[in-house]
Amino acid sequence: MSAIGQDIPRRDGYAKVTGTATYAYEADVDNAAYCVLLQASIARGQVSEIDITEALALPGVLTILTPGQVEKIHQVDDTELYVLQDGEVDYRGQIIGAVVADTPEIAHHAASLVHFSYHVDEHDSTFSPDRHDLYKPDRLGTGEPTDTKTGDIDAAMRKAPHTITQTYTTATNHNNPMEPHATTALWQDDALILWDSTQGVHAVRTTIAQVFGLDTDQVRVICPYVGGGFGAKGEPHPHIVVATLAARALPGRPIRLALTRAQMFALVGYRPPTVQHTRLAADEHGTLTGIALAAVNQTARITEFTENAGSPTRTMYAAPNRATSHRLVVLDVAVPTWMRAPGECPGMFGPEVAIDELAEALGVDPIDLRVRNEPEVDPDSGKPFSSRNLVACLREGADRFGWADRAPRRDGDWLVGTGVAASVFPAFTMQATAAIRYDQGRYIVEIGAADLGTGAWTVLPQIAADALEVPLEQIDIGIGDTTYPRASVAGGSTGTATWGSAILTAAEAFRDKFGDDPDDGDEMEGSISKPPFHEDYATYAFGAQFAEVRVHADTAEIRVPRLLGVFAAGRIVNPRTARSQFTGGMTMGLSMALHESSSLDPRFGHVINHDLAEYHIATCADATNVEAHWIDEHDPHVNALGVKGIGEIGIVGTAAAIVNAAHHATGVRVRDLPLTLDKLL
Ligand code: MOS
């Protein structure tokens, strides 16, 4: 029986729920010292004076790192990693020092005794899309062009009998994984070991080796378990450099560094706020003749980041006249980064609410309107889709959800409505190598991959078992260590497709060489090295989310008693871990829709609600009934496994579905997230 497709519990589940799984901060080392970060309290300027006398006098303090008084950094690609080299302050919360002590208590106390003075420069932390200094980045982070234009959207808008011209906004969201970013660093015998909470051990090794001018084989990064990342652990952030600086200053002494929740609101990235000027033009039948999205987001002066919110508009619906653009407002703020479905997640909010508005204006069912505008080929590239089963998702979702009798109703004091939105996320494959070794009846598969809680520990053995045609019980897997072959970051929903494909290649090579009766010590490697964009096909996963929303008639309290998603995401390796990814994404989308919003105070340049008391996220009580289903999809073109990504698409359409349902219930159209009750009153 095939191991792929089996509903198998997580291999790491027992270790995690019994607390025996060791996370980065808990690395098994002797005599650890503790590092606490010091952060700038101004948004722009220079550190002019530092008084460390009192802190240094505290018994148990080992060293205090201050600007200019640390090892010189060799080379950085990401300017944010140029840490403690000078006293420049580029945003409030930036690292301007660190205290290392024998205990965390002493380190925290000493940190409170370090005093900074500053030359304060004027800063600018006010995000607005109406500014005169909007900046056009060269390319998007994905390598796509900043702007696209086909046909004449302005003419289409003038001629069309039905148009929608609206601005939609999404709030600043912080990734907030359960496990804060943490690093244990040890410099010993001319080599560095980092136990780091990361989405990619090899990415951390490459970057840190470059920053410190080391050979990569002088650096080992270990990360067997991660308590979530959602993109915020996709690239190394400055605290890893600080942990390494401290370790290099104290050879032989392991350094533990964990960010506080509040520090995570300044130091590890966030989804920037977006403004989406959205236009739709349609003929009398509801066939789109034009679709456009002009997106603006905030970025940081120190490092550029573009949220590619226009990307899904390029590919989602057919229309002869299309335009997308991306502009940035460069501010003295912390650096944004990837957050679950960067681009697609915020970028499908405006268009999917706009489609709902158009359906209402036309008196057409919103599902029918979407079906009517299905493209034959990818409108952007002209390539055929390797598979595109959005319509199947919409139809099956409608059946399962009970869409047919969806008239808004009143149930006691509650106004009840339903809504739908479509989802899309690209299916990429990155580069990776896997090794397979045979030893005493067991196949040992090793790959420098990461499991963020997503299930890699479990699904990769399933893929290996089928590829080697041996029982699953005979497979051992090693991941999360740079001693294993180089593998891509767990990001962009590419993990299973990429690492699984590498394992498949290694298994084929292994069987070619050693047959089905290998000897102890037989070993083979296999690699996959594909560009992220497919040459012949447009490769995407699709989905449809349905929401029921109840709004209290007097208080406008909002409840989402039902969320249902149907996805077309290629082959599902493990239904249990896949369902968890889909429903997790949808729950995060519910959270984005109703709760999540980081409030930046432009006077000081920092996020003021920087903890989980003030930054609200969905709890179990908010997400009472979240269901995910998928259609049986066989896509031979995406990769040999037929696997698309599943980590991100769950979040994509959810907020739009909820906002559309709230409108259905109340008649009030909200275009700005989060959908809080004041907006419905
Ligand atoms: Mo995901 S935001 O690509 O880690």
Image (cartoon, rainbow, N blue to C red):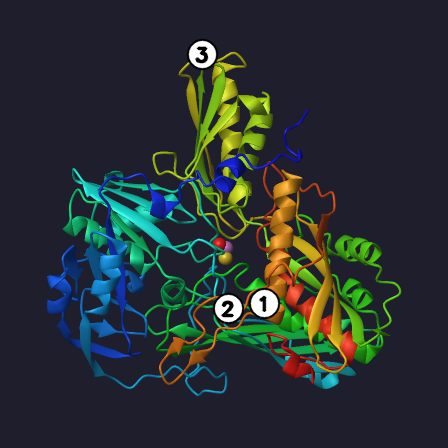
Quarter of the rendering containing residue 232: bottom left
Q: From mark 2 to mark 1, how far is it between C-alphas?
A: 8 Å
Residue 153 lies left or right of residue 50; in this view the side is right
Q: Residue at x 53, y 34 (%)?
A: 11
Mark in front: 1 vs 3? 1
| Label 1 packing within 10 angstroms: few (<14), some (14-19), many (20+) | many
Residue 643 lies left or right of residue 230; in this view the side is right
Q: Which of marks 2 and 3 is nearer the N terminus?
A: 2
Q: Identity of the amino acid at label 3?
A: Asp
Q: Identity of the amino acid at label 1?
A: Met
In the rendering, which numbered label is found on residue 173? 2
Q: Say which residue label 3 marks.
A: 519
Residue nearest the observer in this picture, 557 or 429: 557
Q: Which of marks 1 and 3 is nearer the N terminus?
A: 3
Element carrying mark 3: loop
| Label 3 packing within 10 angstroms: few (<14), some (14-19), many (20+) | some
**Quarter of the image with the C terminus in it:** bottom right
Q: Which residue is drawn at 26% across and 60% down?
A: 36
Q: Is mark 3 within 8 Å of ligand 1?
A: no
Task: From the top left corner, tell me how far across and down residue 339 is, in percent.
Answer: 50, 61
Element carrying mark 1: helix
Q: Do the residues labelled 2 and 1 touch (CB within 8 Å)?
A: yes
In the rendering, which numbered label is found on residue 259? none
Q: Say which residue label 1 marks.
A: 592
Q: Residue at x 57, y 69 (%)?
A: 310
Residue 358 lies left or right of residue 236; in this view the side is right
Mark in front: 2 vs 3? 2
Element carrying mark 2: loop
